[in-house]
Amino acid sequence: MRPLLALVFGLPAAAWAQGLSQPERLTAGAADQLLGQLAPDGERLYFVSSRGGLSQIFVQQSRTGASEPLFDDQADATWPRLSPDGTKLLYISRHGDAAGDLCVRDLTAGTRRCLEDRQHADLQAVWMPDASVLLLGRQGLHGDLELRRVHLEPSGLRAEPFLQENLSGPAVSPDGRWLVYVPLQRSERSVGVSFAAEAAEELALVRLGARGPQGPRLRLRMELPGVTGQPAFSLDGRYLYFTQYLNDTNFDGRIDGNDHGVLFRVPFDSRAASPVTSAALAAPEQLTSAGWNCQYPSPSRGRLIATCAAHGSLDIYALPLEGSVPEGWDESKLRDELRSSQDPWERLLLQGRLLRSARGPARAALLLEMIRQHLGLREHASAAFYTRQLGSLGGELSKMAEILLHLIDHRRQERLLDRGQLGERFVARAQERLAALRQRRGGADADVQALAALVESEVLDALGQEGPALAALRAVQPAALRVPLVLHLYGERAREQLRPHHDRQGLLAAYRALATHAALSTADRLAFSRALVRELVRGQGRGEAKAQLEGLRASVDADSDLAFIVETERWLLDLAAGQEERVREGLFELYRAHKDPDRRRALIAATIGHAASLDSDSLMYQFANTWVSGLSRDQAERRYAERLYRQVVMERAYVQWNDARMGDARGNFFGVTLQTDSLEGHIGFIEARLREGQQDVEEQYKRRFADRPEDPVYLFVRAYLMARALPPEPAALDRTAQEALALLRKAASAYSQRVELQHLWGYLAHRRYLVGRDSTAAQEAMAHYLLALDLARDNVRYRAAVLSQLGLLQESIGNFRAALERLEERGKLPFSDPQAHLLHLLALGRCRFHANREAEAAAAAEEALRLIERTPELARYRPLALDRAALYHLAAGAYAQALARYRAVGAHLAGAPGGYRLTHLLGRAAAALGADQGAEALNDLAEAGRLVADPQVTRTLHRSMLGDPQDILSTYQLIIDGLRARAYRGLGQMEQARQALQARRQVLQGRLRRRPLDEDVLELARVEAGLAGLAVARRDLPAAIEHVRAGLRRMDAWMQQTGTPVHELGLALIMAWGDLRLFGSAAGPPEAELERRLTEVYGTLARLRSPRWAEARARLALQLALIRLRAGRIQS
Amino acid sequence: MMVPGCASLVRLRAAAGPAVLWLASVVTGACIRPPPVIIADRHTVLEQQASVPFDQLQQDLQRAGLSPAPVPLTRGQVEAAGGEAGALPLQPEGPEPDDVQLDRLLVRRCVGEALDGTLVQTPQTCTTPLDPQRVGSLLERTNRNRWQVWHFLQQQRPGTSLQEVRKAWRQVHLEGLVCGAQVQGSDGRWGVRECAR
């Protein structure tokens, strides 16, 4: 029947079968993304992001998901608003004024104009239909707020006064007739409204004329709990959207913008005298679930864009314009969804819709249920709001409402008590409350009496008056009650109060009364039955528990819900004893015997829960399968059954996969694709089939989707098959990847919030980046991987895959620290593929190396080598891992290990390009030097020298080394000469060392002549220092001094060029000169230049006074003192 | 960070010693083209001068190691590695009653029944991430209730010390504790309550 109705009303059957629309995430990443606006053509999304450290305005391409800064003003920019024609963007910039200036950017020309005015701080702005701007700002730090109208004239931006009023969040209707805003009031006289203000609980609305606001202010007071903010008009002006802060979700005692926001809308008729009717104010349309925190609604042509907070960051989301509840859902559909929904906020959203048309007892019942849920969620403002509506129904309900208001207020106060904010006042209020409640005693209505007693008990309990609290609770007779809310409160009180007093029997009796109560629904009775059983067997071993259950079973009506639960639990106890088959049969018998959907659901939940805790895979599978098979696709409950089925069966399939039982795994994956719309099921099926050696997958899918080739599942599968078989040749790979991406873009219309699709998209863009090094492909990959990571929160298999690939992508673009975070998180999960594991370890090592964690990098490379040792299929990668281990050991100063690894790499380089051999030889020589193997180092360096002289070799040097070949050659020559000098010195061959250094000097001088670089000047100074050291070693002190002086001349040039007052090398040279003159046997008095230099440097260090130079300062002082003493210029 | 954007921005020149870091050009919407200034950091230089790129092997490994499929892990494998495989979608969403929350926290060893009868947070043994503020608030409420009960019991048994009341109360309380809950032993160590099978 339902699908037929769906067709009659033009709603596709698929839409009928789908649930509430969830917000679709458009941006991702750890930073905050907010204030999104979609361009009129839907191709670009503009938003503010803090990812660069500043608040910047970004633009994201809808086609690829890649985003980049729209511009860079080198200052915070916020509040982006597109002009109605989409050609300009206004925003608030702090570039010229830290308090904020309005700027307007022409998106085509890229030009910018700002209203630079130091007298005003600009805060928010909105476009008018005539392309002028209404700008909210203030004069001075503590000035009042005001609206000015800014005209965009050829000569610049011109502002004129518009409205003098403290307000926030102005919005103008698309036809320019109305202005809506949130009125503000100063909360302190002396402090500006920007810093201390109270927002009105409602919106204000004023008509706009040619000269500005005219007529009286209309108040738009929504009949909702909490406060209203952030109004925004739909593009056609037919709706006013807004954010409602319904409850004090952060429990700070106030409802304000720091609490969770919920989006609503009301119809708006611009031509009417009162554009929002009282009927609309009485029943605003809730668009988002209160389980989300969404704000800043921005309706576009086809979607509602909002900023929502989830998992610790803000991001931009999209919803249908009508919100989460699809248009066309009638009462029966709403009730069907309500019956199976497990999310309390979604239930409230559905109940709110039903409430709009509910009347009489049905309305009262709905209100009571909503109040109960809000109490359970601690949403006191909403609970109070609906309680007042209940009270307006009159009669006993108004008495009940009065008592409930006491309860709500008490709980609100007690919640504040948790933060230590109330003491005496809380107690005084509680006493007043008790007095009021006692006046209710003696009435006729049992539910009202019981409610008063329960609230009294709760208040007394909070005050620590345990005896009277218990007495009040025990006075309640549940059998006499009819209102479910009261019964639930009774159950709650019993649990809260009796357990700490160890009144187990009392608690069991209370649960029993509720588990068999006729006034409760089946679902509620079953829930209390489970609570009773849980309490009965709590803390007991299997044998005792079974005995207790037998005893209970004997004492209850065999047809009752309680008996059903007891029977179920009795069977499940035997599961722990390893009697799986017998238990399965018993439970199936029970399932078949009971047709009630609530009972069946309860049995399945209990069975699967127990089976999961005992790893009883086959039982989980059978009952998940039974549940889903028993529900038709248009039933709301089917979605929950599918979700469970998918998880259970996929797990089963992966267990079989890991046991290499591909046929069984394939069968289960296939089952998932039949029963659910899981894309992961399709992937599993494809992979299992291919592992079985079958090549007919493509053909199978072609047949399966022959009648619906544009089905999003088929498009996804086609893209997946292309992705897993990308050709190696770069141009062909790029083409194939682009084709696959085109298919995914089409599939995204149905599956944009599926982790499988986002991951595959990221993978394809990633592969494109690896072959083409196209940065936009990297951005696209990053964007989709981040979305996938967010969507993979509950899917550890995808989480592992995305973390790996995101880390590898970031590593390949050089974001080593960001990559390290992902790779280390990935490393906590197991690896199933040795190649993926090896790739991970090498990337991890590289990232650690670049993050200055060289020893840990070496450890990762060694782990890679051990993995290769035990995995024959990885043998060919041994040289790669050896080389990385060698490099990281070298960097970590573990020279012996480095040398061993370098030697091992050498064996794999026969026939390798000259450039490879050159860099290998240099690394090996450096390691040999560090390990005191000077002779070995010299052999390597001689070979390296021959390679450097070969022009063919330079062509094969490292890919990223672009530029002047002569520069590259000379660099390597310098390295070789430098290492040779060290090697000779280490071997005591000083003359050869000197020659090597002189050769080095010559190369540097040649480079300086070609291109004067500071770095080379510094290197020359180092060479002179090295030559000086060698001269000292052969006791030629005058030569040493000459080299020192030459080095100092170089240092002078370097320090002047770079503006550096002090450098270690300069200090070392001057102190060496001093030592040579004063303590060496160099003949002659200290040169005047020496004393001058010493004095200069000493003065510099005295001025700078860094602890780093303390030792040098002391030595210089000593040297200067000695020189002056010897010259007779100090009194000794 | 290497910023994808303008091509040819970064050119590396190797140096024999520690190289100097210059500021990279900023990527703007309209690319600017700075002079071919060399940018290097010590590790990049070392990588290029003292190691063999093995480009082909690297590419082959990337091709083999990257996959469009998820990692075929089982819950058992994840849990054996100390990870959380995620709960089955059986439980209703939304806030749990306090006692259900406490049972869960006790079993996950994030909270323990201390020797003095109160509940305490035990982050060193906790096996799951949690919101310390919310848990703290929960424990504060529960402990406050317990104190009120103990005072009440003491009033019912004049001459009994509060310590004796707490001890007696705790003894009974532990008997009814959920199996697997974390409990502090008389030696001060934290253990787990075992129930007979």
Image (spheres, helix red, strand yellow):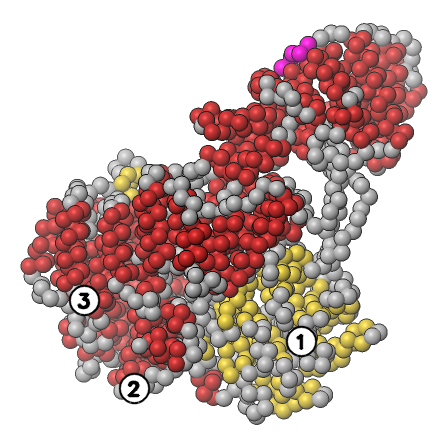
Left or right of A441? Residue A64 is right
Question: Label 1 belongs to which residue?
Answer: A84
Give the residue number, with chain letter if any, for mark 2. Answer: A360
Q: Nearer the viewer, residue A117 or A689?
A: A689
Q: Quadrant of the N terminus of chain A?
A: bottom left
State the residue position of label 3.
A595
Residue drawn at 66 percent across, 70 percent down: A81
Subunit under mark 3: A
Residue type for callout 2: Gly
Q: Is residue A491 above or below residue B55?
A: below
Mark 1: which amino acid? Answer: Pro
> Does A14 appear above or below A1023?
below
Which label sits in the foreground, 2 or 1? 1
Q: Nearer the viewer, mark 3 or mark 1?
A: 3
Tell me which residue sits at (88%, 25%) in the image.
Answer: A1006
Residue occupying image coordinates x 58% and y 50%: A736
Q: Earlier in the sequence, mark 3 or mark 1?
A: 1
Q: Amino acid at mark 3?
A: Lys
Query: Is label 2 on the same chain as label 1?
Result: yes
- Left or right relative to A328: residue B172: left
* Residue A56 in the image, given as x and y percentages of width and height: 66, 59
Q: In whole angstroms, how far apart are the C-alphas of marks 2 and 1?
A: 46 Å
